[in-house]
Amino acid sequence: MTYRAFFLTSAALFAASAAASPASAEEGMWTFDNFPAERMEREFGWAPDQAWLDDVRASAVRLTGGCSASFVSPNGLILTNHHCVASCVYENSTGDNDLLARGFVADRRDRELKCAGQQAEVVTGITDVTAQVKQAIGTATGEALTRARDARIAEIEAAGCPDTATTRCQVVALFGGGQYKLYTYRKYSDVRLAWAPEDRAATFGGDPDNFNFPRYSLDASFLRAYENGQPVNTPEFLRWNPRAPVEGEATFVVGNPGSTSRLNTLGQIAFEREVRLPITLATLSELRGRLIQAMSQSEEREREGRDLLGGIENSLKVQIGRTRALNDPAFTARLESAEADLIARSAANPAVGDPWAQVDDAVTAYRALYLPARFTSPSGNLYGYARALVMAAQERAKPNAERLPGYTDSALPLLEKRLLDERPVYPWLDALQMEWSLSKAREYLGADDADTRLLLGRESPEMLAERLVGNTRLADPAFRRALWEGGLAAVEASSDPLIQYALRLVPRQRELDRLIDEEYSGPLTAAGAQLADARFAAYGDTLYPDATFTLRISYGKVQGWEERGQQVPIATTLGGTFDRATGNEPFDLAPAFAAKEAQIDKAITYDFVTTNDIIGGNSGSPVVDRAGTVIGAAFDGNIHSLGGNYGYDPLLNRTVAVSAAAVQEALETIYPAPALVAELNGGQARRN
């Protein structure tokens, strides 16, 4: 998508479970510089002190592939989910050596496998830069506002991280523009795969079990961070504690929740329900069908398409869950009540004005821009390379402060890594995605629309995709590097058809971005600042902002819930896998499970649930106990958590985690990795 405003906007409104009160017990994805220790103390009789928080923060890892993780040894060993490394496993596989099917164990560190495009980041500082950014914005509006804001952010990031080889700076807008925080990271650009179970062990139950519980999933893997060819020294790490969770015990999930819309106004919620969600469901469903049909043509295609299919199916289930939530009268009534309460509390404050009307006007303008913004950037990795090369070449020719977000000095190292790292490209997959996206553009925009003509010319989606994908050289990382290093002159002189196609589309994409900044992003930022002030005045400053894929901590407890009159247990056991297995996909046993059934301790806790408040992006987050040890890794939510994008229900929303005890059994018995066991034992409490 070209509409960066979609990712920049989180206009403000506090949508708590109870309209007239702050967040309920376990609700909240809290920033580390605003943890509600007093509130937790009242509810649990204990809360972590600053030293505890600092230790956990220094052990938490953000994976730039979109997941969370944690250091669990002093030698750079990283615990995360299997589905967070599935692309790395997939890209290191071949037809003769399918690591997704077989699993992977590096018996020596020199056999650990590089993960293309992956970077591990640890927060080293959080600085409030709100005053600096707001001063730069001043009285500007529309596109001028976004340009002034982005220019000041680029300057702050450049000044904060002059060493871009080992550090990364990122200014994040919180509360819809009410606050701006500079996050400073220590980054590790060489991340390698150390251990992964068979894909079937991690995905047992498949789509039917996804976002459900009970679960029987070994969704865990280990990476390692390297620097200068050696494992990094990580003195701050979480002690490994492979024990069973205890019902009612306090738990913390520490990670990087991706994006929530809990602060959206009812006008924005209406746009979600009426426009974005229906289009997303319809188009993703068609892509899934096209992919399944193409994968059925050969075993090779089945392997090559598996990773993409898993991602599509997961996304579909998320969007279906969000649609159900926004069509649930009881759920939406809570959101309506929350907005009415904030409006009532703000009525006597003339400084607030009517930001809700400003948001409504901005959303109305965005409705006219949404379809062209969504559909004028075709899908596929190869087109993604082409567009990134074109945009980067054009933006790098400008002073840093004048560049678009994503192309500033602070952002370029990661973009360069993602562009130039070697990874397999499957042309049929790229052609399929491009055909699909172009056909959807023609369908939603209309055959006679100017943007459709720009995209297709006189060709059909199928003809154009075949010509572009069949003749591009962008699958070759050396070719991409030559264009990157050659800059704008090399890009504009290139005869590569995909580069030329991107050069044709980018001006229109830039124009749409400019219009969105003028009519949507700029007004939302101004309204968001007003709404943030109103919220703080009404409820105090102990509030949590919407998720922004930055480090957060949530607290909760190990607890089941009631479903259709039945109490859902807190945990499953490894033995339950064999009871649930039918021999047919997706309930067929992983081969290693079947082969080693007699040796597996079936009483060990497998997966468990907690009341921690999480969202997509938290995948791989460590589940930490009061002692600061890791007892599991969050990998999913239950079906009720899908509405968590808009609000949290303490009675029903649950985090699903794989237990450290189950991972330990896998390391010892199912997929033996004695070197990793010894490494983890160096900083753990023995399993009890």
Image (cartoon, rainbow, N blue to C red):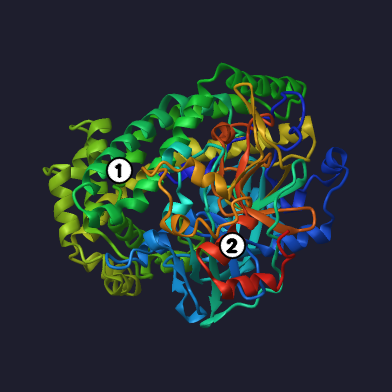
Q: Name the element at disc 1.
A: loop
The quarter holding residue 123 reads bottom right
Residue at the image point whose x is 42% and y is 40% from the top: 207
Quarter of the image for residue 687 reads: bottom right
Q: Is residue 460 left or right of residue 285?
A: left
Residue 107 in the image, given as x and y percentages of width and height: 49, 77
The answer to which quarter of the image holds residue 337 is top right
Q: Secondary structure at mark 2?
A: strand
Residue identifier under label 1: 376
Q: Residue furthest front?
A: 598
Residue 347 visible to the viewer: yes
Q: Say which mark, if any, is on residue 79.
A: 2
Image height of 48 relative to 564, above or below: below
The answer to which of 120 and 405 lies nearer the viewer is: 120
Please tell me the numbered disc located at residue 384: none
Q: Give the label, 1 or 2, closer to the camera.
A: 2
- Note whether 343 is above or below 110 in the view shown: above
- Residue found at x 43% / y 68%: 417
The percent coordinates of residue 562 (x first, y second) are 65, 27
- Can residue 143 be seen by looking at this rendering? no
User: Image height check: is 619 above or below 396?
Assistant: above
Image point 26% across, 36% down: which residue? 440
Where's the C terminus, which quadrant?
A: bottom right
Give the residue type that dot 2 points to: Leu
Q: Position of residue 41 (x, y in %)?
A: 86, 43
Query: Alpha-carbon neighbours of circle 1 within 10 Å: few (<14), some, or many (≥20)?
Result: many
Q: Nearer the viewer, residue 502 or 200?
A: 200
| Residue nearest the viewer, comparing 526 with 262 | 262
Give the left or right position of residue 158, taking residue 318 as reference.
right
At a point 50% along the width and 54% down the height, the residue shown is 66
Query: What amino acid is labelled 1 in the image?
Result: Thr
